[in-house]
Image (cartoon, rainbow, N blue to C red):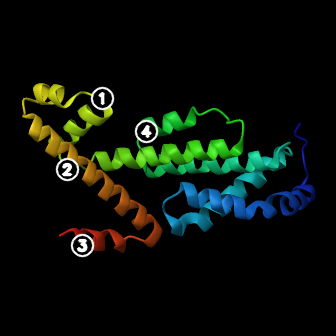
Amino acid sequence: MRSVMDKRECDEWFVTEVLPLEGRVTAYLRRNWRARHEIDDLRQEVYARIYDAARAGRPAHVGSFIMRIARNLLIDRARRERVVSIDFVDDLSRLGEAPELAATERHMTARLELGRLQQVLQTLPPRCREVVELRKIQGLSQREVATRMGITEDTVERQVSKGVRLLADGLYAEKNEADDGPGRRVSLARRRR
């Protein structure tokens, strides 16, 4: 049950109930947002949303309330910055409340990783992307892919191998770029040459 709070009560509630969970909020944002330099700003925006929402009424379960606000902020940011496709954000928005907060965080992380994979998949050369999608996503056999595309089975095998390698390189480069900043991708590209 939510009870309405005046400003003084809200301030006290915020200091005693919300601020002690700062480490948890920060860890959640770091796990689920790839731009490390934005974490402090995101945390402050979460706090502003928490405070505004709490003025209308004290939440019954502070931890899940805070994490739901953090999750919704990341969804809003993803939509605004087009970090992921609209279909992915719609799917993410439809996620139900998980029975436990940890499960919700795992779902969020998995969805963000899927979005990153979708982005990297779009960077593959067209024929390579089509072969990978048919073979690895749709589950067609090597022979079926070759027949459908009018290429040899050896070509299918080479394209799948190339595609998987490029996906791994792209995901690895993106992860390191998120961890180390934008200069990392250039050094990885040079190392591959």
Number of numbered markers: 4
Which part of the image, by quadrant, shows the C terminus?
Answer: bottom left
Q: Does the CB distance between marks 4 and 3 fall below 8 Å?
A: no
* Distance from Cα at disc 4 to Cα at disc 2: 28 Å
- Residue 166 x, y percent position in the rendering: 25, 54
Q: Secondary structure at mark 4?
A: helix
- Taking the image as shown, residue 33 lies to the left or right of residue 101, namely left
Amino acid at circle 1: Gln
Q: Which mark is residue 86?
A: 4
Which part of the image, by quadrant, shows the N terminus?
Answer: top right
Residue nearer the viewer, 21 or 51: 21
Q: Which mark is residue 162?
A: 2
- Whether residue 68 appears in this view of the structure is no
Q: Does the CB distance between marks 3 and 2 fall below 8 Å?
A: no
Amino acid at circle 4: Ile
Q: Earlier in the sequence, mark 4 or mark 2?
A: 4
**Residue beneath the point at 41% across and 66% down:** 176
- Residue 131 x, y percent position in the rendering: 20, 37
* Distance from Cα at disc 1 to Cα at disc 2: 18 Å
Q: Is residue 18 above or below residue 107?
A: below
* Distance from Cα at disc 1 to Cα at disc 4: 21 Å
Q: Earlier in the sequence, mark 1 or mark 2?
A: 1
Amino acid at circle 3: Arg
Q: Does the CB distance between marks 1 and 2 fall below 8 Å?
A: no
- Residue 62 x, y percent position in the rendering: 81, 49
Crowdedness near tag 4: few (<14), some (14–19) or many (≥20) residues, C-alpha within 10 Å: few
Quadrant assignment, res 7: bottom right
* Distance from Cα at disc 4 to Cα at disc 3: 34 Å
